[in-house]
Structure formats: structure tokens, C-alpha cells
Image (spheres, helix red, strand yellow):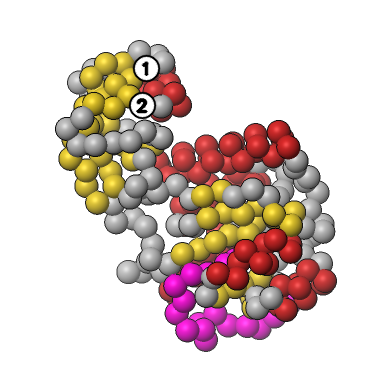
Amino acid sequence: MRIPRIYTDTPLQAGADAQLDDNAAQHVGRVLRMQPGQALSLFNGDGQDYRALIASASKKNVTVQVEQPTANSSESALEIVLGQTLSKGDRMDYAVQKATEMGVTRIVPLSTERCDVRLKGDREDKRLSHWRSVAISAAEQCGRARVPDILPVMNITEWLEYSQRCDVRLVLHHRTEQSLDSLAKPNSVALMIGPEGGLSADEIAQAEKSGFLPIALGPRVLRTETAPVAAMALCQWLWGDFGA
């Protein structure tokens, strides 16, 4: 039987008992209906995996006995920061899920000129919490021991300033012939993805002025939720851990 892999927002220490946080406990106790004596693989974002045995379990509370941790080698040495324009429906969920699988380090939701989603206050807080849950589930599935950070929504000016910390900054633009394999290998990459209607000419000009290189991913126009997956796969292949 496959050992379930669960994220918990709980300190884990070998040889000590730990009580899982509410979300993890409900998943283990209510959804999986696991029983004392059964094994779990836990992670809490510190880069390690912890094997644990369930000591007690109910639908709301689960206590585990934590065993020795093992190093998790699933993280890429390439830091990727994704600036993803907000989109409707499950498109943003898809982008967050697949970006996590691709090894993204941080995700920054963007509010751009042609963006048709506006988030403020409680509504923004709820969506950020939801996207973190999506990222946690994706990390559990793909074997990562770290969950990517999801930052508050930024406008273009805030994003361009924030992304200056990255070695290479790329904006997807289907009308360019810039080749990625001509660039020196970076330690960090910022990717800027526009909405369904694309970034405006002014936004692309602003990005280029801030040091972003326009890149195209072939002759076809990709959807806003597909573009980051393709771009990150290419970056991981050229500079990260794909093909390693």
C-alpha cells in the first residue's frame, strides 16, 4: 500500500510526538480514515521528509510518532519567480498547480491592464489561501518538500521593482526572436505572464525598460495558464534540473 504524503504546518522532530494541524488532521482522519499504527510521510516545508506512525486518530485530531527525517532532493537549484496575471475560473488554479510541479519558488499574482479579475480585501485573502491549498496539494503529489510562496497581488510597477532581485527577467511576447540558449546560466529567473488578451504595448515597454527580455515559445499563441508551464519547463531544461 502506498504511504500517503501529507503536508503539515507543524514543527516535526525525530523521536517526538506531533499533533497535525487541522487541515492535515481532517485529511488523514476524515478523508483517508487512517488508523493508529499506519504510516505517513510528512513534510512541513523545511526541505526534509519525515516518516511517522499514527499514534491516535479521530476525524479532527491526529497525533503521530515522528521518526528520523530524510533529505529531499526534489528542489531545483534554479530559483524561479512567476509573475502570473490573474485569470477567471480554474485557470489560475491550473497555473499554480502546474507551476508547483515545475519547481517554481514563488508565485506573484499580477493585476495588469487587460486583466478581467480584480481582488481586494477579504476576497483577495480568500483566493490567496485557496491558491496555497492548491500548491500544497501539488507539492504532496509531486514529491516536493517545500511549498512555493504565494505573495499578495501586485500591480505592474510593484512587480517590476520586486523582480529586480532575479538574475534574468523574461516577459512572454509572441512577436520576438530572442533565444534563451544564448543567455549565460542564471541562478534565478523571473517570468512575467500576461492575461488572455496579452500584455499591452505599454506594459511590455515598461518591462523591457526594467530589464526584462521578451521571449517567444514558438509560433503558436499559448493560453495564460499554459504559458508558464511551457516557459518553466524550458528554463528547467536549460538551467535547472530537467535532464539532470
Q: Nearer the viewer, residue 220 or 12?
A: 12
Which amino acid does the dot numbered 1 rest on? Asn
Q: Quadrant of residue 24?
A: top left
Please state the horizontal and vertical placement of residue 145, each as a whole percent of the image: 36, 47
Q: Is residue 25 visible?
A: yes
Q: Secondary structure at mark 2?
A: loop
Please state the horizontal and vertical placement of residue 104, each as a whole percent of the image: 49, 57
Q: Earlier in the sequence, mark 1 or mark 2?
A: 2
Magenta region includes residue 223: no
**Answer yes or no: do the residues labelled 1 and 2 have beta carbons within 8 Å?**
yes
* Left or right: 206, with 224 as reference point: right
Which amino acid does the dot numbered 2 rest on? Leu
In which quadrant will I find the C terminus? bottom left
What span is colored magenta in the figure?
A: 174-194
Residue located 82% across and 57% down the image? 114
Q: Residues within 10 Å of mark 1 (few under 14, many from 20)?
A: some
Q: Nearer the viewer, residue 243 or 42?
A: 42
In which quadrant will I find the N terminus? top left
Instruction: Say which residue label 2 marks.
Output: 20
Residue located 28% across and 43% down the image? 49
Q: Residues within 10 Å of mark 2 (few under 14, many from 20)?
A: many
- Residue 121 lies, with reference to residue 232, above or below; the image says above
Instruction: Say which residue label 1 marks.
Output: 61
Residue located 27% across and 31% down the image? 40
* Left or right: 63, with 138 as reference point: left
CA distance separating discs 1 and 2: 7 Å
Magenta region includes residue 187: yes
Please state the horizontal and vertical placement of residue 59, each as a whole percent of the image: 40, 14
Q: Secondary structure at mark 1?
A: loop
* Label ID, residue 115: none
